[in-house]
Amino acid sequence: MMRPIRGLGATLAALTLAIIMGGSAGATSDRPPGKFPTSISLPDGFRPEGIAIGPGPFAFIGSMADGSIYRADLRTGRGAIISRGPGTPSLGMKIDPRGRLFVAGGTGGDARVVDSRTGRVLASYRLASGPSFVNDVILTKGAAWFTDSTKPVLYKLPLRGGRLPAAAVRIPLTGDLVYGKGFNANGITPTPDGRGLLVVQSNTGGLFRVDPSGRTRRVNLHGESLPDGDGMLLHGRTLFAVENGVQNRRSAMAVLRLNEAGTDGRVVRRVSDRRFDVPATVAAFEDRLYLPNARFNTTPTPTTSYTAVAIPRP
């Protein structure tokens, strides 16, 4: 991940952010996470997709309907929209130590950077022209990387010294990852050693290691796959991969153990929950994982209800 700000500046930034968000610097909550709500109600018609958590016990959830961003207090389950969307989706999201949300714009073909404290859009980037689906994002040391499910490319925002760039860099994907019909590259994480990226291909269930140059190599999953693979989260050498179930109607969280290079992995278990309703992405807080239910198999209406659910981290 990107390096945090060091020293006094970091302390002041944390204090400011905590005060604005209603918490105290260095404290995550006033009660243990085990007592937090395990289901968070979202606005009717919201159509959630991406989620990012932090600093502190606050989740940020993006809307597929209009791109609005909802901030939820994990301690209470209550929240509010902090940033009204541009009318195009807000899909995958990640937050950096400065409180900046990096947001994938889906069919809008763009990316935004949003101040999580004020909801103000700090920067917008046109990533693609014509049909595209900018789906997910990951922050690494010195860059933000975005996937596109319909174009075989990654989009890179160089973040030298944490500064936002003037434009994105387009990285064509070559090698083992071949695009076909449907949704292709989706969830993205770093490799455990931090030298590459991992991307899941939703329509095939394949997992691929991607070099910074864009060269891809299929990860050896020993006969397994990640059907309907969606958002992913790396914790050490453990990879959590959401299988949304939009095609096979079996929503689950796959738990994989990877080697350091991210070239080999084994599915060690799958976790399901009766509250899963086509979850799309995942983020962690303390010993929990939080997943927004995108409900892709339910016809959306202005009154359709949506939730994000918490499960113990496997």
Image (tube, grey):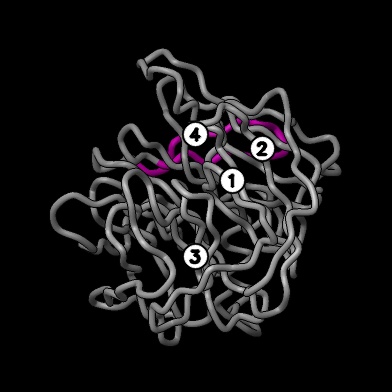
Residue 80, disc: 4
In the rendered view, tell whether residue 182 sits above or below residue 125.
above
Element type at mark 4: strand
Of labels 3 and 2, earlier in sequence is 3
Element type at mark 1: strand
Is label 1 in contact with label 4 (beta carbons under 8 Å)? Answer: no
Q: Residue visible at 40% across and 22% down?
A: 45
Of labels 1 and 4, earlier in sequence is 1
- The spot of residue 254 in percent (x, y) is 69, 47
- Of circles 4 and 3, the one toward us is 3
Q: Seen from this angle, which residue lies furthest top?
A: 303
Alpha carbons under labels 1 and 2: distance apart: 21 Å
Q: Residue visible at 67% across and 56% down?
A: 223
| Amino acid at dot 1 | Ala
Of labels 4 and 3, earlier in sequence is 4
| Amino acid at dot 2 | Ala
Alpha carbons under labels 1 and 4: distance apart: 11 Å
Residue 9, visible in the rendered structure: no
Find residue 192 and report its image quarter.
bottom right
In this figure, which residue is indicated by the disc labeled 1?
Answer: 59
Of labels 1 and 2, earlier in sequence is 1
- Of circles 1 and 4, the one toward us is 1
| Amino acid at dot 3 | Ile
- The spot of residue 95 in percent (x, y) is 52, 61
In this figure, which residue is indicated by the disc labeled 3?
Answer: 138
The residue range painted magenta reads 69-83
| Amino acid at dot 4 | Ala
Find residue 296 and report its image quarter.
top left
